[in-house]
Image (spheres, rainbow, N blue to C red):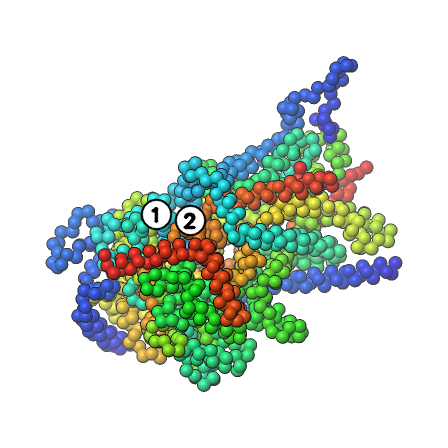
Amino acid sequence: MARIAISDRLMLIFIYTFLVLLSFSALYPFWNALAVSFNLGIDTSKGGVTFWPREFTLENYEIVFQDDRLLNGFMISVLRTIVGTVTAIVMTAILAYGMSRRELIGRNYYMLFFVFTMYFGGGLIPTYLLYRSLGLMNTFWVFIIPSLIGVYHMIIFRTFFKSLPAGLEESAQIDGCSNWGIFFRIVLPLSGPVIATLGLFTAVAHWNDWFMPSIYITNEKLLPIQTMLRQILNANIVTDMSNNLDTASAGRIQAMRTITTKSLTMATMMVATLPIVMVYPFVQKYFVKGVLIGSLKE
Amino acid sequence: MPQAASEHQYAPLPAGQPRRKPNIFVRIIRQWDIQLMVWPGILLVFVFAYLPMYGVLTAFMDYKINTGSNIWANTWVGFKHFEAFFNAPEFYTVMRNTIIISLLKFVIGFPAPIVLALMLNEVRHMLFKRIVQTITYLPHFLSWVIVAGLVTAMLSTENGSVNMLLMKIKLIDDPVNFLSLPEYFWSILISANVWKEIGFGSIVYLAAIAGVDPHLYEAADIDGASKFKQIYLITIPTIMPVIIIFMILAIGNLLSAGFEDILLLAGNPVLRPVSDVIDTYVYRVGLANYRYSYATAVGLFKAVISIGLLAMANYIARKSGNSLW
Amino acid sequence: MKKVRKTSLLIVSAILVLATALAGCSGGGNGKNEPSPSPTAGTGSNNSGNGDAAEAPSDIWQLGSEPLEFSMYGHYNWYDVPAWDSTVAGRWVKENKNVNIVPISAGGNPDQKLSTMIASNELPDVIWLDRGADVERLREMGMLVPFDDYIDKYPNLKTWMGKDLNLLRSSDGKLYQFPNWYTGRPNGNAGYVINKKIYDELGAPTLETTDDLYDYLVKVKEKYGDSVVPFEPGLAKDLQGLGVLYTAFGENTLYSYLNEGIRAVPQGDQLTSLFTNGTFREAQKYIAKLYREKLISQDAFTQTADQIEEKVMQGRVAVFAGANPTVSAMQAHQEMVKQDPDSGYFMIWPIHKAGLDKNKIFPGTYTALGWNVSVITTNAKDPEKIFAFLDWYTGPEGQSLLFFGPEGENWQGFDEDGHPIFTDQYDADEVLQLQKDHDPIMWNGNTGYIDPAKMKYESKLPPEEQNWAARYQSTITWPTQANATEFINLNPLPDSELGIKKTQIDEIFTLAYAQSVMAKSDEEVDKIWDKAEKDAQNAGYSELLAYRTEQWKKNKEIIAGN
């Protein structure tokens, strides 16, 4: 008895230590970015700013929030994330449930059909031309419709559904429940963890995507926050790549400003990332153990 | 309507007559409600993934992008681009690096999130657990530009923290130029990758672990099993289906050994003999020179091999009852 | 205050008049890029002698007579065309010349964005991008509008650029590119920046030859150990500071010989192998020695721009060289002297190998064609009108608007050279702010015109008061940058057979370069480059050299005047 307790205890000590170390190393870059974003850019470039701002300033954030289109971008991002995630999860889950049923005729062929698309694709130009001919250019729907089905997520859903006890479905059928009924009334409620997980993944993907808008959207009102932030960064970048001004003038201008590319980048990164990072803690409560208990009341 | 897991019961036929299965379309229509679950998905994927797939054919042409969707206006060159790739002097190096780096990422990077999830599962203190979960998944959100910048600063020979530490504890006398020595590259690359993705990757496994029946643990406790044994005999087998599926997919992705991470961490050209993988090579030599067809051809090559690997992995996994098809 | 301004303005104008009078006298026919024609912009009258008939040919479009709107796209991932009415100049042009520009953004993804626009045939009207391969690609696909019919009707470009304009012609002989910052004046910032405090503490030794430099670096290392980087080359993987050292070893040895656009050394009238070149080998051995003895930053090939900036800002470098060290050096200098007036940085005349003529050493280069170009696509409804605008924009009116603001505020009217006459209300700070705001819309800068206008102000200040960069520009960097215009356009099309070979050779070069810097001995340096030469020859180096020699000869002919 005592022997077991010691090995368990050692393991726990090791686990806690490891987790603390990992957490510190994972947190540092963000903490540092936060500090830099509140620090005077020119001061940051001297190096040595780690945990706290040395010369506190709000000007990096001022530049970011100055742009009044930012609010619009934020709304678009939020709307896209919510609508996109809900619709994609529902569609993909339904598909995955169907695919998980052993009696589905053709399910292996269907599976091959889907898996094939994970490796073979037409490339950007054919895709672009397709979206164009479908009238998706410059609309909100270009964010939603093409990503309704995620094959990778479908596979994960399917794996979960398949691992549910068969008895569950049988007893429901005996009670006269239809297949769709089983899905919505029984399977879905039990899939809390996997819905939470894939919902999180989908939300993150939607929130972080800046590529699609850059290609398919020109209407400013539809640009999400990621693209806006990039534009703000570009507009304020202190670059010596633009050889436009001779060094003397450029230098004099630079002397007037205290913002650097780095400090602005950190500020935009904070604004871009914090909202989505905050989603996970809320989602964690779905990772509750024993969701299946009580469902198989004999 | 009530349906058994297997097919319908058929009306008993007069003795002596062979039973005939109804026509397949009839059977499909009989299970219309389940079929209805999948067909919208099939149509969507058909439209958005299969319709553009003709672009793959440009691998066999000298594609000029102003022809747009009218790809047949380009000259057909057959396997010219494939040959160019296979005959490139860097081909063996690039393939070798791709496979090695991928395998390393798999051997170390695949179990890592699982181990983290298992560890987190042992934590009783709920607040600590949630905080750690949230923090460890943050690095996933950092761009590789930032992560590479951090790694470069840490490994710098001038005041880099790693060198400073090693010199302080007298392990080395002079700073080691880690990022300029080929022998360190793979370790650095894998470590950075694992650190960045371990938290986010563990989420799926945590969700899977949430599905384990706690009664099983209670019973095991009563029997006197140690934590190790419990993990080994209860947790892992329960989440095995998830692990296997992911493993199959990972094997299918063997030829995608990375891109942005390598591009940014292998800045020094001397690292190229160990760092160049298919995607970085194609980017530098192909895309930067507008050789779209070349890039498409290499992509197609990767895809064909990947599907082959996937099929193999799937076949092996079938025996465990968990496979894609 | 006002009185002082008025008198100084008077003095300035007087000097100006004198200067222009003198300029006008010397070699009138040779004024390639500082001509003194009477540039009355807007009307395009052919300068056929004097006293032109007042009738403007009827098919020349007057800017402002009709509304003009077109879309503009910048093919870069760090640049977006700003909203046209967000700048003073933009609003002025909209109101007074009835021109509106609609921005198209690359969204950080220029290559993909442009591909999709090409594939769907929805190009923007004007694209602002680098010269060379991209432009050729577009032209080959028939998507660009040539300017040949327009350059006489709207003559600012032709006038201010002179014969160099022909270098911008494409292989079909037509002109598609509207240049930006074209100039015959030397410009550029490559050179050596020295940390003042360290220099003083080591006794201010002579720093002229490569041996001097070596000795100096050794002393730095001895005294400061690991806390100071003796020689900081910047981003060595882009060949930066090390390329500057290369120029020290031969007269007229240009940094550009190392770049992917040339990778050869002119000898006589041929371009010969860089890999076997004696001067190059010598330079590489010297560099390898410095690196081996830890006199060059060991992080040279791996560090990021941020790390370099940090070192420079903290004063932890003794010698800092590169193609553009002045920007960070200036910033650092200003911050450092705030804490300690004896610190900071200064620049020295370029280092040279003992025995060479120090006036023939050029750490940097420039081309008369400037930095990048604008092109008009076949999508544009009114290409001629757009050209008319661009031409006006590059002329005195447009440039003065961009640099000094609308007429009537900081300036009024033009003097005999066509330069703006500054008014009493000239506000230097406002002018600076304007230049900063207009920087993103300066698409066809006319350096030949605007620099003299600006320098008037700057050069009359005593050296100590002059802006750090301006001072070193005029005394050190500008005189030591070589004109490399004859070496442009030496690249084959990237997706051609020869282009593929070129890429292969580039790969060989970049790898060998990094390896040779880290070599352990002189013999190893030779070994590395001998092998590289062999590999390059196998990949078709002689063919590439022959091609480049051809193109170079053509360039020289054009420059000499057809």
C207 left or right of C463?
right
Residue B44 picture quarter:
top right
Q: Position of residue B298 (x, y in %)?
A: 52, 46
- Disc 1 marks a residue whose amino acid type is Arg
Q: Is residue B62 depicted above or below C297 in this figure? A: above
Which of C380 and C359 lies nearest the eye of the viewer? C359
Residue at image coords 47%, 44%: B293
**x%, y% of residue A230?**
47, 55
Q: Which residue is mark 2?
A: C497
User: x, y (%) of residue A34?
Assistant: 56, 63
Mark 2: amino acid: Glu
Q: Residue at x 47, y 38 (%)?
A: A130
Question: Which of the numbered marks, if any, corresponds to residue C139?
Answer: 1
Label 2 secondary element: helix
Give the side of residue A139 with respect to residue A105, left or right: left
Chain ID of residue with mark 2: C
The answer to whether the residue labelled 1 contacts the one labelled 2, judged by CB atoms less than 8 Å apart, is no
Q: Nearer the viewer, mark 1 or mark 2?
A: 2
Sequence-first tag of 1 and 2: 1
At a point 56% along the width and 72% down the height, the residue shown is B158
Residue at 60 percent of width and 39 percent of height: A115
Q: Which quadrant of the view contains residue C10?
A: bottom left
Asked whether, in this view, residue C69 is left or right of residue C505, the answer is left
Q: Which mark is residue C20?
A: none
Of the 4 image quadrants, the one containing the C terminus of chain A is top right
Residue C52 visible, this angle:
yes
Q: Is residue C471 visible?
A: no
Badge 2 density bin: few <14, some 14–19, many ≥20, Cα 10 Å: few
- B306 or A17: which is nearer to us? B306
